[in-house]
Image (tube, rainbow, N blue to C red):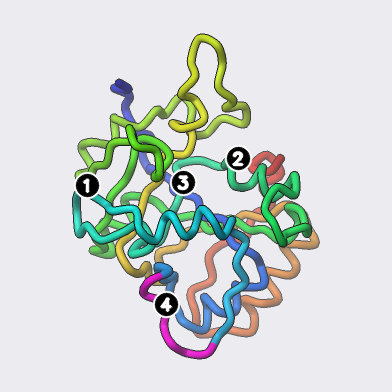
């Protein structure tokens, strides 16, 4: 079992399609799948539909409980398995590559400051042997040597790397937009597009937009 000191601040990463940014700014928040406002806005999904069905019934055994879709999910590092699948066109219906994908970055400390309940896992949320936690002191159960790595494939000496890489931090129901501390993008074109969208919402929080080539495959 990992017993590693988490970084401080403990950054969290969520990937969304840039086409959804105006929706998040309009709502002034990120919402869990099961707690999305009935406002008529159409959110562009980039997820595997079969995986999402499983997350809608997977029980969370601690914290506010419920199911995974009652939470806004973040990873503990970039280079997620999800991003690789989108990049390599392994998600049915998605072929646009990494360019339109942006990172929304917050931190465990910011989530706590905003008073949002949360849980987190030490691996893939659907794996039967993943453990769940709801106390900041338990963050040492995350494999901090792995979650930020670009290379995370299982090896003969460690066939659990891929599961541990996919440890998640889940914010219950909603996270206010003001909790986003940075927007990471692939290149200058994406930075310009994000800043143009932000400019349409002068009264909203504008986190810094930074080109993060090294967060992409």
- Overall secondary structure of the magenta stretch? loop
For marks 4 and 2, give the CA distance: 27 Å
Left or right of 54? Residue 46 is right
For marks 2 and 1, give the CA distance: 24 Å
Name the residue: 21% across, 49% down: 61
In the picture, the disc for residue 58 is none
Label 3 belongs to which residue?
Answer: 75
Looking at the image, tell me whether mark 3 or mark 4 is earlier in sequence order.
Answer: 4
For marks 1 and 4, give the CA distance: 23 Å
Looking at the image, tell me whether mark 1 or mark 3 is earlier in sequence order.
Answer: 3
Quarter of image, res 208:
bottom right
Q: Is mark 4 on a helix, strand or loop?
A: loop
Foreground mark, 4 or 2?
4
For marks 3 and 4, give the CA distance: 20 Å
Foreground mark, 3 or 4?
4
Q: In this picture, which residue range is highlighted in magenta?
A: 34-40
Q: Is mark 2 on a helix, strand or loop?
A: loop
Left or right of 119? Residue 78 is right
Q: Which of 189 and 81 is in front in this view?
A: 81
Q: Which of 141 and 104 is in front in this view?
A: 141
Looking at the image, tell me whether mark 4 or mark 2 is earlier in sequence order.
Answer: 4
Label 2 belongs to which residue?
Answer: 79
Residue 178 appears in the rendering: no
Name the residue: 25% across, 61% down: 66
Above or below residue 62? Residue 203 is below
Are dots 1 and 3 in contact, CB under 8 Å?
no
Name the residue: 35% across, 58% down: 57
Label 1 belongs to which residue?
Answer: 134
In the picture, the disc for residue 36 is 4
């Amino acid at each position: 079992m990992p017993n590693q000191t988490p970084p401080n601040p403990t950054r969290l990463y969520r990937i969304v399609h840039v086409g959804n940014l105006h929706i998040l700014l309009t709502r002034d928040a990120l919402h869990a799948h099961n707690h999305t406002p009935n406002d008529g806005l159409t959110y562009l999904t980039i997820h595997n539909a079969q995986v999402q069905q499983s997350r809608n019934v997977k029980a969370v055994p601690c914290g506010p409980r419920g199911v995974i879709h009652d939470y806004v999910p973040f990873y503990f590092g970039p280079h997620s398995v999800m991003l690789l699948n989108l990049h390599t066109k392994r998600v049915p219906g998605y072929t646009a590559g990494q360019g339109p994908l942006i990172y929304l970055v917050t931190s465990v400390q910011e989530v706590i400051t905003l008073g949002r309940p949360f849980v987190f896992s030490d691996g893939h949320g659907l794996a039967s042997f993943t453990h769940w936690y709801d106390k900041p002191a338990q963050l040492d159960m995350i494999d901090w040597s792995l979650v930020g790595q670009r290379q995370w494939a299982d090896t003969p000496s460690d066939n659990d790397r891929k599961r541990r890489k996919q440890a998640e931090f889940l914010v219950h129901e909603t996270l206010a937009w003001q909790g986003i501390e940075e927007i990471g993008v692939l290149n200058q074109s994406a930075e310009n597009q994000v800043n143009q969208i932000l400019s349409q919402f002068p009264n909203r929080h504008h986190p810094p937009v930074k080109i993060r080539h090294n967060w992409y495959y």
